[in-house]
Image (tube, rainbow, N blue to C red):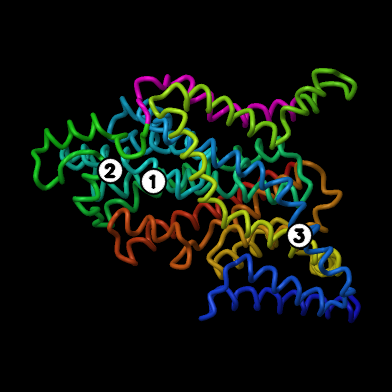
Amino acid sequence: MTGHTWTLLAILAAAIAALILLINSRLRFHPFVALMVVSIGVALAAGQPSDKIAESLEEGAGGILGNVGVTLAFGAMLGRLLASSGATDRIARLIVDRAGARSLPWYVAGAAFVIGIPMFFEIGLIVLLPLVFSVAQRLRTTHGVKGSPYVYLAAPAIAALSTLHGMVPPHPGPLIAVDGLHASLGTTILVGLVCAIPTIIVAGPVYGRWIAPRLDVYPDRELVAQFTGGAPSGSTSAGQAQESGEERSGAAPAAGDLGKVPTGWALAAVLVPVALMLLRTLAELMTDESSPVRHVLSFTGEPVVAMLAGFLFALFALGYRSDMGADKVRTALTDSMKSIAGILLIIAGGGAFNQVLEDSGIGKAVESAASGAHINVLVLGWFVALLLSFSTGSATVGIVAATGILAPMAQGGGDLRTALLVVAIGAGSIGLNYVNHAGFWLVKESFGMTLGQATKSHTAIQTIVSVCGLLMALLISVFA
């Protein structure tokens, strides 16, 4: 490596340190502002012409918002429709309705898996809380499990939601990596699902069964009553608590009439966009380039088109079929946009940062250094995302920065290897989820945990997910 290469690597190290400092210091910069400030600093330090810096920022931010931002917006609206119409509650109750005590964690994991496909971690957890609290109350009164039934059921929900959020499109993190690394979307979905299933099993039902007897976790009675729709558990009989949980488990998230939302339509609304994306990949693998079928499926499988199709299906099949009314549907969709405004800004800032790394030559310097040191690109991507996510408190920052740094190394790697890199980066962004992450506090406060209990449950679960995701990606890479 040349002296100039070492200089560029030093600039990158300083940029990462500055990013962490700006976000975590007393200044408490918003990640979007921090990314933009650091991007300009990197460009100047690397000697990029001043008249090209603004162009790099605009190109990077605008490009990634055009590819990912619109898709994310449709995904947020789809998720809100599913929750507000009561569809997610019907899916969850359908999956766990007839499960026994020992099999309940597996059914909760299945419910969280389906619900987690279109929903962010925090939103999915809030949607599942009524179900988890209601079923945990039944286990508590019947003594159907050793230890805390809440941890017993929360573990598989946390594992499934976090795994999908970090490793499987159409979630924003994986979509950012797919776009930045020019990976095949369909291949990434398939690889992500293959890696996700054993990861969820280990971090969810298996770890949950082990940790539940070791944690004395019981949420606030008033909070349980709020989510289950009944009186506080301490003021009712066991039979009343069980009946209340069974009848009202979906009261909190459902704004529409559950009876008017057929379960089949609800499942279809979740799976439509994923199915369209997978069909595109199958068409590209199995049909000729001139085939009309391939052209149609390639168009409908584009992320923005697939998410639009899923949203429109949910709008008519769920939104207008429920008792919400057109005005309430419109209000719900507007509110869903507010919840992702910050994420869109962070994505834009990450796009600008990535473009500056490319235009200044830093990306090539990283590629040269990693090649010379013989570092496995999957491990490098995982570690960079883990470091940045843990340091900044944002999985999105970890993914967008790691994608920019690793992008030059992904060129020419083939569809499967690039998809595995997307999964590895996403897995890295999940690990060490601690006090500077919003999800940590959501879990801690929802279940009434102490700091130590939240660390042993939530942080441990997401770190297991992170490590298992990397191991699965490495295992598949052996055969790639």
Task: Classify residue 258 as left or right of residue 121.
Answer: left
Type of amino acid at the residue the image marks with label 1: Ile
Distance of label 1 from label 3 (alpha carbons): 34 Å
Task: Classify residue 59 as left or right of residue 215.
Answer: right
- Relative to 378, residue 268 above or below: above
In this view, which residue lies farthest toward the front? Answer: 327
Q: Hey, which quadrant is residue 94 in on the image? A: top left
N-term mark: 1 or 2 = 1
Q: Position of residue 340 (x, y in %)?
A: 55, 51
Mark seen at residue 227: 2
Q: Magenta residues: mostly which secondary structure?
A: helix
Q: Is mark 3 on a helix, strand or loop?
A: helix
Mark seen at residue 126: 1
Q: Where is residue 23 in the image (x, y as percent from the top left)?
A: 57, 73
Q: Residue at x 63, y 58 (%)?
A: 345
Distance of label 3 from label 2 (alpha carbons): 43 Å
N-term mark: 3 or 2 = 2
Q: Hey, which quadrant is residue 216 in on the image? A: bottom left
* Magenta-drawn segment: 256-282
Q: What element carries label 1?
A: helix
Residue placed under numbered mark 3 in the picture: 406
- Residue 280 inside the magenta-drawn segment: yes
N-term mark: 1 or 3 = 1
Crowding at label 3, few (<14), some or many (≥20) Cα neighbours within 10 Å?
many
Q: Quadrant of the N terminus?
A: bottom right
